[in-house]
Amino acid sequence: MNETPQITAASWLMVATLGLTWGGTFLVMEIALLGMTPFWLAAGRIGFAALLMLAIWGTMGRRLFKAPVARSGWAIVALIGALSSAVPFMLLAWGQQFVTSGFAGVSMAAVALIVLPLAHFLVPGERFTLRKGIGFVIGFIGVCILIGAQAFESSGIALEPAGRLACLSAAFCYATSSVLMRRLPQVDPIGLATVLLCIGAILVIPLAFIVEGMPSALDTRTLTAVVFLGLIPTAGASLLRVLVIRSAGPVFMSLTAYQVPVWSVVLGAAILGEPLPSSLLLAMALILCGVAIIQYGPLRRLFLRG
């Protein structure tokens, strides 16, 4: 796909929705992990989301690519399916046993670090300019301030360094799959989101059996959390993610990486009663400033049109 990214008001709305949705996901995962094992949590949310998307896709004729695709194209789709759901979901669920939900949310800021250089070399129209570099640095300083406020509080668990590495590795998976997704030929967004989730389910469910055995019975709270994770941040967000990347590009999509840490801290304070760091307002200001600089052109066109 070689078209120049098209960033519209709808693109901004979808990115804002994704930032809020994924920012709150870590709280729900923390609740779900109290009643089930991490690989089965990943399998449950992906499996539920895949079934839901299959039902929706079935009513629309099950279209995918608009022209025949070579085997290499299907191999890339399989890789994207692994890197966009199965692998990062397992890494996050496993890692969140040993780190705070704040750290898990903040680690997603690394997506923007990885996407910008990858897109510069691999995606037409996504050049790493001086302006983007300045905005990136300012936004990342805000993320660092946010990290310093709360996210690195130790849980006192020996495997915490491995948990941190797992969360950061999940960010690498998201960034790589975003860039690869943008390079696919013309494709139906709902079909692509469905196929990627199905690939994820095919990979993670057998692994859950191998690593953790049969799943245990779920209580109502855990089951509700899994259904929510499958419906909102997995099925719904996967579709929005495909729509944003395919239209506005992976660099624009990476702006969610700046929002997720803010929302994870804010929602943690509002819902779990966690202390609200005094540096949060400064961090948010820097993050939003960085986003505005990176996306100055689309913002200017948006406001002039409005």
Image (spheres, rainbow, N blue to C red):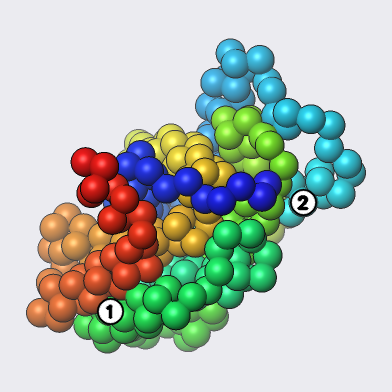
Asked whether 86 or 217 is in front, the reply is: 86
Residue 300 position within the rendered picture, expressed as x and y whole percent measured from the top left: 28, 56
Point 10% across, 79% down: residue = 278
Residue 8 position within the rendered picture, expressed as x and y whole percent measured from the top left: 38, 43
Instruction: Please count the marks in the image.
Output: 2
Q: Mark 2 points at which residue?
A: 76
Q: Residue 58: tell me if it is visible.
A: yes
Quarter of the image for residue 180 reads bottom right
Residue type (three-letter) at the residue carrying disc 1: Gly
Point 67% across, 34% down: residue = 187
Q: Which dot marks residue 158? A: none
Residue 130 position within the rendered picture, expressed as x and y whole percent measured from the top left: 44, 80
Asked whether 167 or 28 is in front, the reply is: 167
Task: Using a 10 Å C-alpha cutoff, classify the residue at mark 2 as few (fewer than 14 neighbours), some (14 to 19) or many (20 or more).
Answer: some
Helix, strand or loop under label 2: helix
Q: Name the residue under label 1.
A: 142
In the rendered image, the quadrant that contains the C terminus is top left
Q: In this view, does 260 lie to the left or right of 218?
A: left
Asked whether 31 or 55 is in front, the reply is: 55
Q: Residue 31: tell me if it is visible.
A: no
Residue 259 position within the rendered picture, expressed as x and y whole percent measured from the top left: 31, 62
Compared with residue 59, is residue 21 higher up or lower down, i.e. above or below? below
Helix, strand or loop under label 1: helix
Quarter of the image for residue 57 reads top right
Q: Distance between the residues labelled 1 and 2?
A: 34 Å
Q: Is residue 162 left or right of residue 228?
A: right
Residue type (three-letter) at the residue carrying disc 2: Ile
Point 56% across, 51% down: residue = 4
